[in-house]
Amino acid sequence: MTTATAHTDEMGGRQVLADATEKLASADGDVVLDFSTVPRLDSELLRRLEDLVSMADQKAAAIKIRNVNIDVYKVLKLTKLTRRLSFVN
Amino acid sequence: MSTVETVQERTNLPLATEDLDPKRIDYLDGLVAQASTAAALFTQFTQEDVDRIVKAMVLSGLEQSAYLASLAVEETKLGVMEDKVIKNMVASEFVYNFVKDKKTVGVIREIPERNLLEIAEPIGVLFSLTPVTNPTSTVLFKCIVAIKTRNAVIFSPHPKAWRCCAEAVRIMYEAALKHGAPAGIFSCLESPTLPDNAYLMHHKSIGLIDATGGPGVVKAAYSSGKPALGVGAGNTPVYFEKTADINSAVVDITVSKTFDNGTICASEQTVVIDDEIYDRVLKKFSDLGAHICDEKETALLERTVIDPGTGFMQPMAVGQKAIDIARFVGLKVKKGTKLLIAPIGGVGREHPLSVEKLFPVLAVYRAKSADEALRVCLDVNHAGGIGHTAVIFSRNDAVIRKFGEVINAGRIIVNSPGAIGALGAVYNDLVPTFSFGCGTGGGNSTTDNVNIYHYLNIKRLARRTQNHMWFRVPNQIYFNLNAVENLRQFPSATTVIITSPLLEQIGHVEIVRRYLPPETHVHVQVIPDAEPEVKVILQGVETLNFYKADQIIALGGGSVIDAAKIMKLKYESPAADLEELAAPFLDLRKRVIEYPTEKTNRARLVAIPTTSGTGSEVTPFAVLTDKASGRKVTLADYSLTPDVAIVDPQFVMTMPKALTADTGIDCLTHGLEAAVSNYASPYTDSNAMQAIRLAFKYLPIAYEHPNDEEARSMMHNAACIAAMAFANASVGVNHALAHALGARFGIAHGRANALLLPHVIAYNAAVPTKFMPSPFSQGYVSHTKYAMIADLLGLGGTSVPEKVTRLVEAINQLLDQLRFPRSIAELGISKEDFQQSIPGLAQVAFADPSWRSNPRMPLMEELVELLWKAYEGRGPAQTANVPQDDIVQEVVTR
């Protein structure tokens, strides 16, 4: 299994999620997203993350998020996405 | 929905699937999912983000207020366009004015004096039902309040007002979205149906139902089992009292009842007018454009605008103009008639117009008296209007207040129009709203004008408070040999010396007399040397009254001083009820009973102890025995503390050995219990530790060498110092058990303490089965405090358990040295007798307030175990289970 690491930031979050989606589509293995520069989620970013999770479910891969801030984590909790993600340090 | 669930799991609504097809359910679930996501994203928004969006929405609402008003009138055929514009503007501008500076994100209020923070937590997704009568204004209001509080809303408008409401939602949504709100934050059901409402009301992702509408909607909301704000019908009574400004009041009622053709549920329904002004009031109404119906016309109205089957108003009349209603009913009225006024003779089904009428028909009642007027208003209030709104016009403040007390309404509007007054912020300082809480009487959870705070979960962050503590002792304490000479400095016209027969006999009273100022008249009251009885107290009070004493000198042991304390209390405050003052309490500062502060007489209490143990000369406690009831009551209040204590060892030089030992161990127990008490403080610790040190050093000497002045003096000081500690930190389980043993078997108090002391130390030093909740203590420190006492006494040991063991051993040695019986069995009490007494002893001990400050909460079975240990005497492994903690210096100075 290979691991693809994607870094997200406020401006480039969409691109990074798109890259991660591409990596997941082209290879097996878990995807690790570094959220250290993501202070906030918006509707589109959240939707893309949901799509990524759905794709990972289909491929039996895991989406792992590291360095998530607590405000973003709360959004993931409220949308019940935390059940489908794993969080690493 | 992100997970596969059944409809029942989502809603707990078994019938939903029968009434809704799967496509509709998918549609509804989609709205909820979209709103849930938006609400989740919204949690990240700051106050500034929210305020920016709210302002934009408000401006948009104001801009579109006329458009939305026209749309509402066109669709609903209710009300007055011009008035609906004002409603929309109030819902935007006035609501904004209220919310704009309010904090609704993060910390919304700091209460430093209570160490509290209030923090806002959004609810999430609200399901909101809006009425046909105030459609667009209600939507504008709810959208603004929802955004201000970071919530998403799914709207279900009344079907007859769907189009205008959907448009209002769209306008608000677009403004919000444009300024950064999450997508999906508002939505409006397309073609809402009752099954839709039922499904959403039970949907698990809906956090709150906000239902504004008729009784059916409100009932459904509250029946769903969801948190709900249900705001429904009213029936506003108006009391037109004889002192009212008639001109102003008639205009106000006309303004209100005709506003939007009476569609606001807070508008006036029945006006009860005092007889004295009735005719003038009706004439004024008539002058201003009202038509006053005669009996026939009233009957015609009753039959037409009220449904005879249900007793409720006919929907076809709601929101219609007076002139149109008159035409429909067949009344001949003048052109331009604004209002139809129908005199009625009472309230109830036989008087159909006494119910809510959301159109410009007003019932009036002629009241012969103020009492009748209030009665009729209350009848109207209870005929469908409980909790909603009431109005009074009067210049008599007493009548206004009485009306406010009698009528059950969330809003009681004074000298202003009911409908607009209830909306708030126009005629008064009520919170602006379009949703009126009607309290429990109206089946609602609040009587408030619903506002932003009802759309928030308010979390309270409560920091641990450092409770104020105290260290209270007599103002003056004189000690060392011949300290009694200080009596000279206390001027007194009449002094009563309370003492015991023995002390008078051995000349102690004479010593005291010698040092009183020569001009002082002195009377000696001799009382038995036993716990004071009520009879003895009352005799003493009689003496104090007879001599008009301004000074009381208590010369004796604890019982005599206690008696003097209670005599002083009753002398100064004759109405003091001793039984009541002895009521139990948990925290002295919060107890129910208050000691009297108003005093008929005043006297200084000087306490001169003649034993070295109880320390009553500096404590706020006094024990009283009521022989008639067989009860012993403990009084506790700092007002009982003597004003002056004179700790002069000359009065204890002749104490017998047994009394020296008993009182000395009582003193030691006071120190040890105060040291580990949950109320211990650095102030009490310093006293407790010093008293323990003095007692260990000097008690054996005073016992073996009764004439040793230094030992006697130091033990006398030790008793007083220990008492200062326990007067402020209290005692513990040792005293609770000793009181029980003393009462049951007549064991002297000090002796009973001695029987228990080693066992209680071992018990308190071990890890508690149950910790005692106490805001004063930080962590469990009894074992380390015992270890520190062991260090203070130079007992050695390298670990806390070892030091505690050494302390227990040292106490055992001391008790042996003082020739104490070391078990209850040694006192000649049979095992069978003791066994039989155990349940009662444990119960009495548990009822004793002494243990409330004990560091370890005693369980009943543990009290029993301690009693058995005391019965059997010292046993093995008394200090088992003592934690191996280090001694932390801070425990002494926490």
Image (spheres, rainbow, N blue to C red):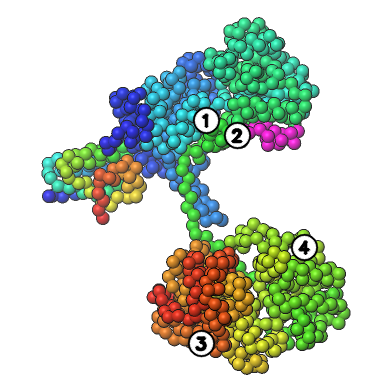
The chain holding disc 1 is: B
Which quarter of the rendered picture does the N terminus of chain B lie within? top left
Residue of label 4: B573
Confirm whether residue B739 shows in the render.
no
Q: Chain of mark 4?
A: B
Could you confirm whether marks 4 and 3 are on the same chain? yes
Q: Residues within 10 Å of mark 1 (few under 14, many from 20)?
A: many
**Amino acid type for the residue under numbered disc 3:** Gln
Horizontal side of residue B4 vs B684, given as left or right: left
**The disc numbered 3 marks a residue on which chain?**
B
* Residue holding disc 1: B231
Q: What segment is highlighted magenta in the picture? A: B396-420
The residue that disc 2 covers is B410
CA distance for labels 3 and 1: 76 Å
Q: Nearer the viewer, residue B371 or B240?
A: B371
| Residue B514 locus on image (x, y percent) | 81, 85
